[in-house]
Amino acid sequence: MLTHASRLEHEEKYLLPAARSQTALGLLRRGLREDSDYPRGRIHSVYFDTPDWKHLEEKSAGNRHKTKLRVRWYGQIGSSRPSGGCFVEVKVRLGSARSKLRLSAAPEAAILAGAPLQDPVFGDLKALLGELGIPASGTLRPVFEVVYDRYRFVDPINLDRISLDTKILISRTNTLVCHGRTGVPLNNAVVEVKGPGGRLPRILERDRRLNLRRSSFSKYEACYMAAINNAQCT
């Protein structure tokens, strides 16, 4: 069942040093209100790609049109135990605009969290990607899992949704596809702004300690470059 189909919306991303993420979090808590439904959580995303890394290349080549394919589930910050079900997602970007389609998937998150990425249970999820309009679903394979802590807020002035993502890392790889470093966080955190305003909250914009800069940052690409790029991939 299709559980979510977002309209095309504006999204901007801003990078900051990971060492400044707690400062940013404190400012956001002081100046904005926490999201009432999902204020914080640990996000797990298993990315899928083709044998020639088509979807990674779309980003690396700077294509205006980009597609990301993933299976996602959620947990609590500070815990490796997942909660609830999982979802298959297709995220499409056209410049700074983005849209997302999501289908609920049958396996419990706990099953996916405990299975190696080369397990057939992940392969079975490719059929759902086909239902979301991905024609190359037969050639897709899971490549690696990215996890991070997300804190969500709402800007009462611009009516944007603000998230701060920290401790971003690859937690495991599909060893039939590639090997690389796991468990090492990126040096950057990221603030994402989604909504009509598309700009940083003033409380962050004014604080020069954060060294914030606008970026076309992709967790998928950044984790690949940090952990997989110099490893052997097939």
Image (spheres, rainbow, N blue to C red):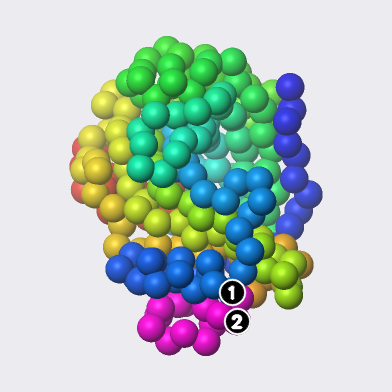
Q: Quadrant of the C terminus?
A: top left
Instruction: Tell me where residue 232 sits by quadrant.
Output: top left
Give me the C-alpha separation between circle 2 and circle 1.
9 Å
Label 1 is placed on what type of residue?
Gly
Asked if the magenta segment contains residue 56, the reply would be: no
- Which residue is labeled 2 in the image? 202
In the picture, measured across the screen, residue 225 lies left or right of residue 135, that is left
Is residue 8 in sight in this rendering?
yes
Query: Which circle's residue, 2 or 1, is located before the other in the chain?
Result: 1
* Quadrant in which the N terminus is drawn: top right
Dot 2 alpha-carbon crowd within 10 angstroms: few under 14, some 14 to 19, many 20 or more:
few
**Residue 68 rendering spot, x and y as whole percentages:** 55, 43
Residue 202 drawn in magenta: yes
Q: Position of residue 172 (x, y in %)?
A: 30, 34
Callout 2: helix, strand or loop?
helix
At horizontal 49% and vertical 60% (from top left) the residue drawn is: 164
Toward which corner of the image does residue 158 lie, by quadrant? Answer: bottom right
| Crowding near the residue tagged with mark 1, few <14, some 14–19, many ≥20 C-alpha atoms within 10 Å | some
Q: Nearer the viewer, mark 2 or mark 1?
A: 1
Q: In the displayed image of the protein, which residue is found farthest to the front?
A: 30
Q: Which residues are magenta?
A: 201-215
Percent position of residue 211, x then y = 40, 80
Task: Residue type at mark 2: give it.
Answer: Arg
Figure check: 118 above or below 152: above
Q: Which residue appears at 41% of the width and 78% of the height?
A: 210
Left or right, residue 223 beside residue 64:
left
Describe residue 18's horizontal placement relative to residue 200 as left or right: left
Task: Identify the residue under disc 1.
Answer: 31
- The answer to the question of whether label 2 and label 1 lie on touching residues, with beta carbons closer than 8 A, is yes
Is residue 30 placed above or below 52 in the rendered structure?
below
Above or below residue 202? Residue 120 is: above
